[in-house]
Image (tube, grey):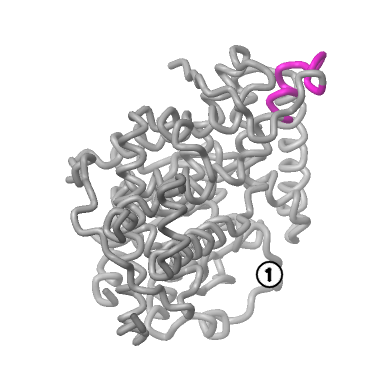
Amino acid sequence: MEYVMTEQAEDHPLPARETAGLSVEERFEREAMPHLAELTRSATRMMGDRTRADDVVQETYLQAWRSFSRFVPGSNCRAWLYKILFHCVHHYRRKWFRFSVMQPMDDYVEATAAYTEPIPEHLTDEDFLTALDCVPRDYRAVLLLVDVEEFAYKQAAEILDVPIGTVMSRLSRGRKLLREQLAEAGRQMGYGGADR
Amino acid sequence: MTCSEALARMDFAVDAEMAAHLAGCAACRDERERREELRHRLRDAVRKPMETAALEQLVRTRSRRNGGGYWVMAAAAAVVAGLVGWGAYEKGYSPFGNREQEEFLASVSGQVSHVMRVGLVDHLHCTVFRKWAKPAPPLEEVVKEMDPKYRPVALLVSQQMPPGYQMFVAHQCRAGGRRFIHLSLRNEEGKVISLIVTRRQDGETFGGAPYATAHRFQLAGFETTDFLGYVISDLDEAENRQIAQALAGPVAAFLQTVG
């Protein structure tokens, strides 16, 4: 499979002159390998554990390596790697979890826009990760791409291969689900009944 | 713009109309700040640094198989480090610095499936990379590191082993975010056998491939409803399988009693 990103704006692109004259192997080392850690953390959140995440990241880099000769120097390597990553996550899950998972509908609209419950300050990073892991996969993917990795909506749409409107609705729904999870975690820890 | 309309658009970019509303509405302004703060905290939580040096090495090693001079050099370095490490391991002590451990781990664990790697990584960390006293203390001393409820399995395993093997590891440990029960035995020639047990996670199974070879390690897996078991050794393949087959039933029965 060939991976193509139409959005070519690199967040911090390596100037073409810096990669001119380098071999494919050297370019891959300089452009792709520095993103491995952040891809691993995103994969860990998507797969639910580090071991599976490592498998998916390996597969991502193997596929990236195989098609790297077609990668345009100076274009958005990070977004390109994420696109491959989410493709691999999807295939890994299909391979290992051969049952269908009911996913909420994409055309969700905030029917009851309301002020949110304040999130207790005492919640730890671990509480945030647990809450995120409870958000359904499609919404979690958008939260990771937009809120954590700070991709633009358009880039997230290209990475996930969905319309930009879907990214926005999933983002809105995902944030709401995350807030609900955190509020529930706060209540369970005795921080409920916030001061609103 | 009403507060209700502002809330519905709260998660997206602020346009002029929204900005005007926020300027005059303290409640919506607070709400937006609260949501922004939540995003910051989520970002900080997810972006905590992770150890990925071993994975990087593994990626390079696997890519080597797809050609490329650079990768060949990097992988060759890993293999050399692995061989040097192995030679020292054979002499009975741990020679591995952090980097050598990572390279050896990457070059060996890349040769087996995900489910096999779970046990193999624990075997490498606890048995190969750590130093252990020689000769090993008596069994009753070794098992003191274990939770008392798991100690019977140490006795059970030691009874099933070929003659001449003495237990030198009996503990619970963690690797890759998982918990393990780990027992290791060795003989005078330095041959090592490990039994490793961990809880199954969703979808994990040895399926039709319960045996594997990586470097000089032979792996055999067995599974119960809740657990994965591994016998990993540097014996030959047939001996390793034989030990796994002898251990699988009694260990599974024991695991049922501890839940």
Q: Left or right: where does residue A6 sit relative to residue B78? A: left
Q: Nearer the viewer, residue B20 or A141?
A: B20
- The answer to whether residue A25 is magenta is yes
Prevalent SS, magenta region: helix
Q: Chain of mark 1?
A: B
Q: Is residue A66 above or below residue A157?
A: above
- State the extent of the magenta-drawn residues as a range: A18-30
Q: Is residue A156 visible?
A: yes
Q: Is residue B116 visible?
A: no
Mark 1 burial class by Cα count in 10 Å: few <14, some 14-19, many 20+: some
Q: Position of residue B19 (x, y in %)?
A: 46, 53
The residue under label 1 is B132
Q: Nearer the viewer, residue B48 or B184?
A: B48
- Report the residue at 61% width, 46% height from top: A37
Q: Position of residue B216 (x, y in %)?
A: 59, 42
Q: Left or right: where does residue A90 sit relative to residue A23? A: left
Q: Secondary structure at mark 1?
A: loop
Q: Position of residue A188 (x, y in %)?
A: 31, 81
- Report the residue at 72% width, 21% height from top: A25
Dividing the picture into quadrants, the one containing residue B61 is: top right
Dividing the picture into quadrants, the one containing residue B206 is: top left
Q: Left or right: where does residue B149 sit relative to residue B134? A: left
Q: Position of residue B44 (x, y in %)?
A: 56, 61
